[in-house]
Amino acid sequence: MDKKKVAFICVHNSCRSQIAEALGRLLAGNKYEFFSAGTETKPCISKDAVRLMKKLYGIDMEKEQYSKTLNEIPTPDIAISMGCDVGCPYIGREFDDNWQLPDPTGKDDEAFIAVIKEIERQIRLL
């Protein structure tokens, strides 16, 4: 049986959605296939996100992940918005869930870690 495809969507696909893709693979990759995408891309994943994910989970997000748009991933069975504080992208249908996470970009490590831990909590609830 095919695993359901879960996509984490935000505008730039450079921070929260990338963290969710990496944690999804780590924590629930046996149940789901995880992807992330944005309506725009950034040249690279957030350096703070990369550094903290390596430190907290031993995950090198730059090894297998990159900033990509919706047309570069398979059509998801479940689409989750990371939060619309930066403007919600339109993906052709309603989101299945909106985690309403604040964007930690430009903030301190504590702000990043709080978002990372909330993403971990939400993934464990999937």
Image (spheres, rainbow, N blue to C red):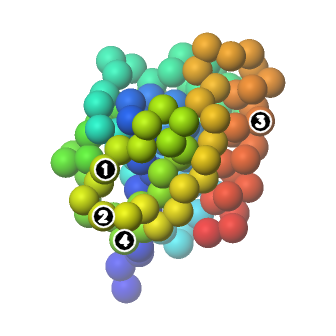
Q: CA distance from mark 2 to mark 4?
A: 11 Å
Q: CA distance from mark 4 to mark 1?
A: 16 Å
Mark 2 residue type: Arg
Q: Is residue 4 left or right of residue 92?
A: right
Q: CA distance from mark 3 to mark 1?
A: 27 Å
**Mark 2 touching mark 3, by CB under 8 A?**
no
Q: Is residue 12 left or right of residue 116?
A: left
**Mark 4 touching mark 1, by CB under 8 A?**
no
For the residue carrying disc 4, how many other residues have a C-alpha within 10 Å: few (<14), some (14-19), or many (20+)? few
**Looking at the picture, how far across and down is residue 20, in whole percent?**
55, 46
Q: Earlier in the sequence, mark 2 or mark 3?
A: 2
Q: CA distance from mark 3 to mark 4?
A: 27 Å
The foreground one among 122 and 27 is: 122
For label 2, the residue is 93
Residue reaching furthest to the left: 71
For label 4, the residue is 77
Identify which residue is drawn at 69% across, 51% down. Answer: 120
Q: Secondary structure at mark 4?
A: loop
For label 3, the residue is 114
| In front: label 4 or label 1 | 1
Identify which residue is drawn at 80% across, 24% down. Answer: 110
**Vertical placement of residue 108 versus 77, above or below:** above
**Looking at the picture, how far across and down is residue 86, in whole percent?**
48, 32
For the residue carrying disc 3, how many other residues have a C-alpha within 10 Å: few (<14), some (14-19), or many (20+)? some
Residue 60 in view, yes or no: no
